[in-house]
Image (spheres, rainbow, N blue to C red):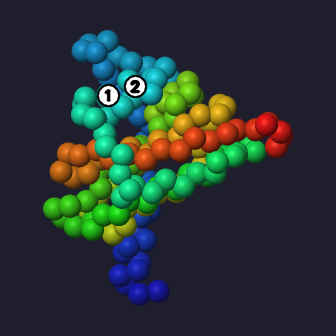
Amino acid sequence: MQRRDFFKKLGTVAAVSAVMPAMSFAGGSKPVSPNKMDYNTAVKTITGGKTPKPSKKVKLKVPEIAENGAVVPVTVTVDSPMTESNYVKAIHILTGKNSNARTIDVYLTPANGKAMFSTRIKLGGTQKVVALVELSNGEFLTASQSVKVTIGGCG
C-alpha cells in the first residue's frame, strides 16, 4: 500500500466517522423531533428552502425490489472534482414514507478524494429513496428511485 492510498482511505474512514444522526430544528423555537420529520420538512431543513435540482451527476444505486426492508443496500456516487473550490459537502439519504424521512447524513471534505457513500438502510415499506447532495457552491442536486419492499420475497 502506498502512502497516498493510505491517506485516501484514512480520509474515507474520517468521513464515515462523521456520520451523525440528524438533529434538526425548524419553525423558530419549536424543535422538530428527528423521529417525526416528514420528507418535505427534511428537505426544507437541509436546503434552507432552496429547490434541489435533479441531476445526472448524482448516481443513486438501490434495488428496484428489496426482499428484506431491514437491510436495503444504497450507494451514492457524485461526479465531482473534489477540489478545494468545488466539492461535495454532504450526501443525505431521505425516504418518502419512513417515520423519519432523514435516514442518514454524510459530510465530506475535498480531502476525501471521491464523493461516494455506501450503506444499508431500513425501509418500512414500498417507497421512494432520495439522494440529496449539497455542493460547496450552495447548490443542491438530487436523484431518486422507487423501491418495492416485499415480505419474504412475496409482493
Residue 104 is at least partly visible in this image: no
Residue 124 position, x and y percent, is 65, 31
Residue 90 position, x and y percent, is 34, 49
Are the residues at dot 1 and dot 2 in contact (C-beta closer than 8 Å)? yes
Query: Where 34 falls versus 130 (above or below)?
Result: above
* 7 horizontally vs 66: left or right: left
Residue 49 position, x and y percent, is 25, 29
* 61 horizontally vs 152: left or right: left
User: Residue shown at 59%/34% (left/top)?
Assistant: 127
Residue 101 position, x and y percent, is 49, 30
User: Residue shown at 69%/46% (left/top)?
Assistant: 65
Instruction: State the quadrant of the C terminus.
Output: top right
- Work out how far the residue at label 1 is from the one at label 2, CA to CA, in angstroms: 6 Å
**What amino acid is labelled 1 in the image?**
Lys
Q: Say what secondary structure mark 1 lies in.
A: helix
Judging depth in this view, the residue of 1 and 53 nearest the camera is 53
Judging depth in this view, the residue of 25 and 55 nearest the camera is 55
Residue 53 is at least partly visible in this image: yes
Judging depth in this view, the residue of 59 and 100 nearest the camera is 59
**What amino acid is labelled 2 in the image?**
Asn
Quarter of the figure with residue 123: top right
User: Which residue does the numbered mark 2 point to in the structure image?
Assistant: 40
Quarter of the figure with residue 150: top right
* 123 horizontally vs 144: left or right: right
